Amino acid sequence: MSILDALTMTNGLPSHYKELKEEEMVKRIQAIKKEMGDRLYLPAHHYQKDEVVQFADDTGDSLQLAQLAALNKEAEAIVFCGVHFMAETADILTEDNQIVILPDMRAGCSMADMATIYQTERAWDQLIALFGDTILPLTYVNSTAAIKAFVGKYGGATVTSSNATAMVEWAFTNKERILFLPDQHLGRNTAYELGVPLEAMAIWDPITDTLEYDGKYEDVKVILWKGHCSVHEKFTLQNIADVRDKYSEMNVIVHPECSFEVVEASDYSGSTKMIIETIEQAKSGSKWAIGTEMNLVNRIIQQHPDKTIVSLNPNMCPCLTMNRIDLPHLLWALEEVYEGRQTNRIKVDSEISQYATRALERMLQRV
């Protein structure tokens, strides 16, 4: 489901949930969790609102949560507080008798929607015509199940921001070139870190079906899909200059979904997990400007009052689609599960699941 489809669909949330007071919703959620016990598992992504995170059985990044869901064999229902592609991955990795529920079907991911299966199949045919059988596809886990399946079908694998370096290295032992979907920034930053010059990177534009490259095609080593994270792309070089001017001894740490220029100008870059752990291990009194999603930054600030921590971009908004999930939607999803209904169930087609599992397993075997 694309974000456009999701935003134009009927919300589905019964109107009376919007009229409930927060205290009542909290009380009812706590009661359901207590009553269902181990039959219910509630993972929440780091970018979720605090009002949702407070009920999480586990918090983490998308793949970590899907893996934890797969390890939980007791739960009959997994109410995944994240976005659509995360719930898909959880459904792929969990047992057939377990159901995965997304509290709000409008919780999508703009980056994942930037690479549809139709665009990707069309691009693949043209790229193979240009380069022959020299390309291995990789996809960031922030992609649809259909894209993961495509990559799995053609011998490739998924990657996370934590293991992208290892997976790109692995890919180059198999083929001369890689196609990196759907985030051009993570692909560029990772390949550059491994010594691939920018001059050896081309960009595939899925809107115009064209390869953006000025040199000789035989020099291309990395083909970057023209996609990006709407949140992380908003961090700029000016943001870095501003915090360095305002705060002395400021450490700048950003997510590798940020642009190449921002990552290069920062002191540190790494996955969500790396950012959290770096701040946890930092000395008391140290100063940090963090370039990632605002809900997480605010939570880190609250957890570390002994450090000076700010958002790299003070005008940032939280991830809008991730924030579709709120107390009313969470309560509704849990009450539907409690009553035995499968409202907002995420179910991946068996053939797609089979190939997507191959892509995930190739990665998991190497991390």
Image (tube, rainbow, N blue to C red):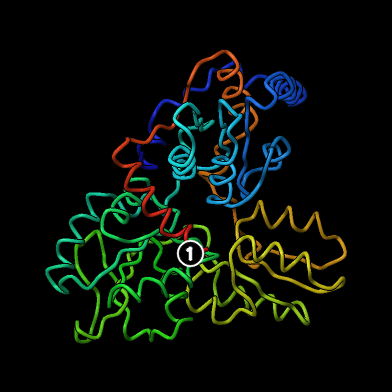
Question: Given the image, on which type of amino acid does mark 1 rest?
Answer: Arg
Q: Residue furthest front?
A: 365
Q: Please indicate whether residue 124 sits to the left or right of residue 179 in the image.
A: left
Q: Is residue 367 above or below residue 221?
A: above
Q: Quadrant of residue 23?
A: top right
Which residue was labeled with disc 1? 366
Question: In the picture shown, does residue 49 fall above or below 231?
Answer: above
Local SS, label 1: loop
**Pointer 1: residues within 10 angstroms few (<14), some, or many (20+)?**
few
| Position of residue 310 measured from the top left corner of the image (x, y, whole percent) | 73, 65
Identify the residue at horizontal 27%, vertical 53% (top origin). 153
For residue 41, side relative to residue 199 (left or right): right
| Picture quadrant of residue 227 | bottom left
228 is higher (above) or lower (below) than 223: above
Residue 160 point in image, percent of width and height = 49, 61
Seen in the picture, residue 33 relative to 152 is either above or below; the reply is: above
Residue 129 in picture, x, y percent from top left:
11, 69
Q: Residue furthest top?
A: 339
Q: Position of residue 132 (x, y in %)?
A: 15, 72
